[in-house]
Image (cartoon, rainbow, N blue to C red):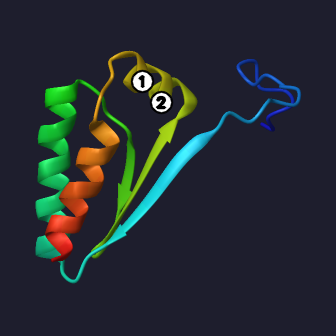
Amino acid sequence: MNAGTHPSAAASGPQERLSTLNWRFEFGSYAATRHFLDQMADLSKREDYYPNVSFGKTYVNISIDAEGQAALAERNSSFMGEMEALATADRA
């Protein structure tokens, strides 16, 4: 069955692109990557904000969409600064 005849498939028109902030952090080892991810989990729990995260053995990609940016700004959160500080500490 193709998407055109599938009852749950819906066509969508052009969508406005919302701004997204993206970071890529690279680490020298899996242990450093894992340590950063554990610290990010703690930060996310504390701030009650969970960005989009993808990772591999020695890197982590983090994206915060426009809604996330607005939510963090509304709470006057220091999430992004703390995240960057955690990455810098793990690379040192």
In the rendered image, which quarter contains the N terminus? top right
Name the residue located 47 percent from the left edge and 46 percent from the top edge.
63
User: Is 3 or 64 nearer to us in this picture?
Assistant: 64
The crowd level at tag 1 (other Cα within 10 Å; few <14, some 14-19, many 20+) is: few
In the rendered image, the vertical position of residue 2 relative to residue 61, given as above or below: above
**Quadrant of the image occupied by residue 41:** top left
Of badges 1 and 2, the one in the foreground is 1
In the rendered image, the vertical position of residue 27 relative to residue 71, given as above or below: below
Name the residue located 88 percent from the left edge and 26 percent from the top edge.
13
**For mark 1, what is the residue?**
73
**Residue 62 x %, y %:** 41, 51
**Quadrant of the image occupied by residue 73:** top left
In the rendered image, the vertical position of residue 58 relative to residue 3, given as above or below: below
**Residue 17 x %, y %:** 74, 36
* Amino acid type shown at disc 2: Gln
Name the residue located 81 percent from the left edge and 29 percent from the top edge.
15
In the rendered image, which quarter contains the C terminus? bottom left
Q: Residue furthest bottom?
A: 28
**Image-based side of 16 in relation to 56, left or right:** right
User: Which secondary structure, mark 2?
Assistant: helix
In the rendered image, the vertical position of residue 74 relative to residue 13, given as above or below: above
* Amino acid type shown at disc 1: Ala
**Residue 26 x %, y %:** 33, 74
Mark 1 and mark 2 in contact? Answer it, CB < 8 Å: yes
- Gap between marks 1 and 2, in whole Å? 6 Å
**Image-based side of 40 in relation to 63, left or right:** left
**Mark number displayed over residue 69:** 2
**Mark number displayed over residue 29:** none
Name the residue located 33 percent from the left edge and 22 percent from the top edge.
76
User: Which secondary structure, mark 1?
Assistant: helix
The crowd level at tag 2 (other Cα within 10 Å; few <14, some 14-19, many 20+) is: some
